[in-house]
Image (tube, rainbow, N blue to C red):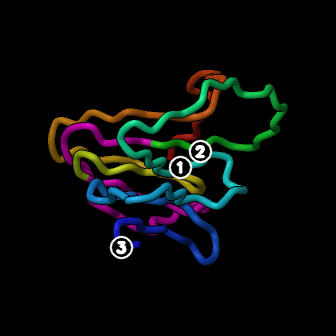
C-alpha cells in the first residue's frame, strides 16, 4: 500500500505512517496481530450494522507504550529515533495523517498551528513515563 509507510531500524519497526488519502474499500488492518496497539479501517456499506456487544474482560500484560496520533489540523515534521536515540527518519505530516509509534523515540516540530488526537493505552501514570533526550 503506497499510503502506508513502515519506518524501520534494521528489522525493528519504529513507526507506521498512514496517509490521509488511504480510504480502503474493504476492512483492512495495517498492523500485525502481535502489536500491542491495533490500527485498521473497518468498512461497512450503507445500512450495515455492528451488532450490540460488550468486550470480554481479558488480562493483558504489556511492556512499553505505543501511541496513535491523528493529525487533525496543521502540519509538522516528525523525527523518528531508534532505541539508541539515533535519528532514523524525518517525515512531514499533514491533516488527516495517522502515526502509530511502536518502538524507539519520536519528536515533533510544528510548521503550522497543529492539533493532534492522541490515543494510547492506559492507565496514564504521569510524565515519569517519558525519558526526554
Q: Confirm or deny contact between disc 1 and disc 3 (CB under 8 A).
A: no
Residue that appears at 56% across and 35% down: 120
Who is closer to the viewer here, 17 or 21?
A: 21
Spatial CA span between label 2 and label 1: 11 Å
The image's mark for residue 69 is: none
Q: Residue furthest left?
A: 112
- Residue 104's x, y, as percent? 57, 56
Q: Does the stretch in magenta take in 92?
A: yes
Q: How many marks?
A: 3
Task: Assign the magenta stretch its main secondary structure.
Answer: strand
**Label 2 environment density (alpha carbons within 10 Å; few <14, some 14–19, many ≥20):** many
In the rendered view, would you say 132 is above or below 12?
above
Locate residue 79 relative to residue 33 in the image: left or right: left
Badge 2 or badge 1: first in the primary sequence: 1
Locate residue 61 relative to residue 47 in the image: left or right: right
Locate residue 2 relative to residue 21 in the image: left or right: right
Residue that appears at 69% across and 56% down: 33
Badge 1 or badge 3: first in the primary sequence: 3
The image's mark for residue 2 is: 3
Identify residue for label 1: 39
Identify residue for label 2: 66
- Residue 59's x, y, as percent? 84, 32
Query: Mark 2 or mark 3: which is in front?
Result: 3
Residue that appears at 17% across and 35% down: 113
Q: Does the stretch in magenta take in 36?
A: no
Badge 2 or badge 3: first in the primary sequence: 3
Q: Considering the image in quadrants, where does the N terminus appear?
A: bottom left
Q: Which residues are magenta?
A: 69-93
Amino acid at each position: 500500500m503506497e499510503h502506508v509507510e513502515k519506518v524501520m531500524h534494521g528489522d525493528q519497526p519504529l513507526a507506521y505512517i498512514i496517509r490521509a488519502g488511504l480510504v480502503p474499500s474493504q476492512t483492512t488492518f495495517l498492523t500485525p496481530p502481535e502489536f500491542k496497539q491495533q490500527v485498521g479501517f473497518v468498512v461497512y456499506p450503507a445500512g450495515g450494522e455492528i451488532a450490540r456487544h460488550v468486550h470480554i474482560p481479558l488480562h493483558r500484560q504489556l511492556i512499553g507504550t505505543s501511541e496513535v496520533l491523528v493529525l487533525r489540523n496543521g502540519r509538522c515534521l516528525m523525527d523518528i529515533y531508534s532505541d539508541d536515540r539515533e535519528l532514523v527518519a524525518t517525515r512531514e505530516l499533514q491533516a488527516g495523517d495517522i502515526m502509530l509509534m511502536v518502538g524507539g523515540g519520536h519528536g515533533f516540530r510544528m510548521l503550522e498551528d497543529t492539533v493532534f488526537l492522541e490515543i494510547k493505552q492506559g492507565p496514564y501514570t504521569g510524565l515519569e513515563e517519558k525519558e526526554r533526550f
